[in-house]
Image: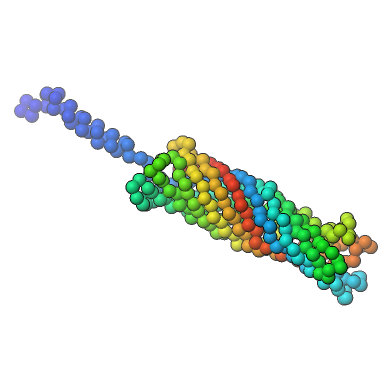
Amino acid sequence: MGLGLEKPQYLVPLLFGLSGISACFAAEPPGDEGVYVGAFGGLGAVNSTSLQQKGAVFLRPPRRLPRLPIDAKGSTGSSTDVAVGGLQLGYEWNGWDVGSNWKLRPAVELEGIYIGKHSPVGEMPVRPTFLGTQYVTVPTTAGVFLANAVFTLRTPYSDKIEPYAGIGAGVAIVSIKGSDSANPSEPGINHFNSDSNASDTAFAMQAKVGLKGRIGKNLSLFAEYRYLSIDATSYTFGSTDYPGVHLPTTSWHVDMGRQQYNLFVAGLQYKF
């Protein structure tokens, strides 16, 4: 009775105070830090690049001297029918406040990209010039593995749509299957016919920019542009083997210049 706890009016302000404190903590937004996974796909194009085919024809069979050296050099046309898909695993930090209601969140991610089959054709004048022009088709696929650094910007204009940019570097495994080296002066002859498949690995790097939109508590949709570069590669294809039809040759060495892709992709990202 001396404390007055039997009077409910003393309890009401206390209860309101405790509920207010609880509400403040409940309203605290969840952190942005955490592991995420993503999947994406899209389309793009590959720029024109240099292509060179080198080898020799044995003028006196069986395979021995003298030999006629062949050097065909030119460039491929661009290809606009490149399909791409991939997966990513990353970790994003809460980041830094960079101004009034602006926040920059860094992330690191591992990414695997598959570039679908596309078939650039090289138009390559031959030395010696009396042999005309060689047309080389290289049906190409690539698997690219990259480590990326990504920076997402939260702006005061929206807490659901965020721009981001990233850079990455890694390795590409480039495969050519079913290649063809044709010359109009020798119809029906594929100069790589004894082995038309080859592969090589090369350094790869990319830059990307995009927009990410939150469509659920843990789920985001993103759309982006990527520039992907794969360093020059070299391949060895089989000799020309048409007994009684074409003189035998050495194996053929083909050098392809740097491949530059412009890609537009969209995907989903889930943060745990």
247 vs 126, nearest the viewer: 126
Q: Position of residue 213 (x, y in %)?
A: 48, 40
Residue at x 12%, y 23% (from the top left corner): 7
Q: Is residue 249 shown left or right of residue 153?
A: right
248 vs 68, nearest the viewer: 68
Task: Identify the colour scheme used.
Answer: rainbow
Q: Is residue 54 above or below residue 137?
A: below
Residue lying at the far right of the rendered structure: 244
Residue at x 65%, y 61% (from the top left corner): 258
142 vs 77, nearest the viewer: 77
Q: Is residue 212 above or below residue 148?
A: above
Q: Position of residue 184 (x, y in %)?
A: 86, 58
Q: Is residue 138 shown left or right of residue 46?
A: right
Name the image quarter holding residue 30: top left
Q: Is residue 196 shown left or right of residue 95?
A: right
Name the image quarter holding residue 53: bottom right
Q: Position of residue 243 (x, y in %)?
A: 92, 62
Q: Could you tell me which quadrant the C terminus lies in?
A: top left
